[in-house]
């Protein structure tokens, strides 16, 4: 009886600990939380000038996301931004910038894979495929994920994955992340407003409405 009770308590404790770890991953770090209030970034257009654009070039609202393909909160935000783009049509575009965290050992290679898919016009499809495969990143072959993303030339993709030039993209994005004082993912700009975390759709919509009003003045 005592042995059964001990086993039950261990299972309960394991569930609680797992829940706390998941919750921590889905929220900004403590360092980020203190800076999570919206911050005005007057030079925001410079951050939107580079990166992979998903959406129209003339969208009045551009969301520049510094993200990490192994970050659970980034996956949540990516899903919400996809919904927003579908709802908002040509009013909203997303620009993806890389900020792979050191705590995520495969994030840099995932970033490289997205850029290599982008060379074949499949960045957005690879972006979506990487987030959908997040739990298996690092255990599956990059070719397998690229096939799901519709990358046509796998030989070219493989050569690109070994191309040292791809590191320059990560260096560029890291420098701009540093300029913005980014220490957590996802950090993103909605035009000139910087935010940190996977905000609910209602909050994102409020910020987009504000940005639209300002853009149309």
Image (cartoon, helix red, strand yellow):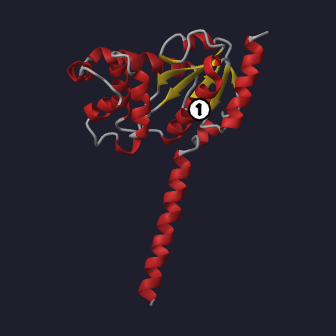
Q: Residues within 10 Å of mark 1 (few under 14, many from 20)?
A: few
Q: Which residue is drawn at 59% across and 32% down?
A: 83
Q: Can residue 191 be seen in this view?
A: yes
For this view, does 104 lie left or right of residue 23? left
Say which of 112 and 164 sits in front.
Answer: 112
Q: Residue at x 28, y 32 (%)?
A: 142
Say which of 32 and 84 sits in front.
Answer: 84
Residue 114: x %, y % from top left: 37, 25
Say which of 212 and 108 sits in front.
Answer: 212
Q: Which residue is drawn at 41% across and 27% down?
A: 125
Q: Can residue 184 be seen in this view?
A: no
For this view, does 93 lie left or right of residue 157? right
Q: Quadrant of the N terminus?
A: bottom left
Above or below 132: residue 214? above
In the rendered image, which quarter is residue 46 located in? top right
Above or below 5: residue 31? above
Residue 16: x %, y % from top left: 53, 63
Total labels drawn: 1
Say which of 86 and 115 sits in front.
Answer: 86
Q: Quadrant of the C terminus?
A: top right
Please tell me whether mark 1 sits on a helix, a strand or a loop: helix
Residue on which disc 1 sits: 83
Above or below 34: residue 12? below
- Considering every residue shown, the one lying at the far bottom of the view is 1
Residue 27: x %, y % from top left: 58, 43
Q: Which residue is drawn at 33% across and 26% down?
A: 150
- Considering every residue shown, the one lying at the far right of the view is 217
Residue 205: x %, y % from top left: 70, 30
In the rendered image, which quarter is residue 77 located in? top right
């Amino acid at each position: 009886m005592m042995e059964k009770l001990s086993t039950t308590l261990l299972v309960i404790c394991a569930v609680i600990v797992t829940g706390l770890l998941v919750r921590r991953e889905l929220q900004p770090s403590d360092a980020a939380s203190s800076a999570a209030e919206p911050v005005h970034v007057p030079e925001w257009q410079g951050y939107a000038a580079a990166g992979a654009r998903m959406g129209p070039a003339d969208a009045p609202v551009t969301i520049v996301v510094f993200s990490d393909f192994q970050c659970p909160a980034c996956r949540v935000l990516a899903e919400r931004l996809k919904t927003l783009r579908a709802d908002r049509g040509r009013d909203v575009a997303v620009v993806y910038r890389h900020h792979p965290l050191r705590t995520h050992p495969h994030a840099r290679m995932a970033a490289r894979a997205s850029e290599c898919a982008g060379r074949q016009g499949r960045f957005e499809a690879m972006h979506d495929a990487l987030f959908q495969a997040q739990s298996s990143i690092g255990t599956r072959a990059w070719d397998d994920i690229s096939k799901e993303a519709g990358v046509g030339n796998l030989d070219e993709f493989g050569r690109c994955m070994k191309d040292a030039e791809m590191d320059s993209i990560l260096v560029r994005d890291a420098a701009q992340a540093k300029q913005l004082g980014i220490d957590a993912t996802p950090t993103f700009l909605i035009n000139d407003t910087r935010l940190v975390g996977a905000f609910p759709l209602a909050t994102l919509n409020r910020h987009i409405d504000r940005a639209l009003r300002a853009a149309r003045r």
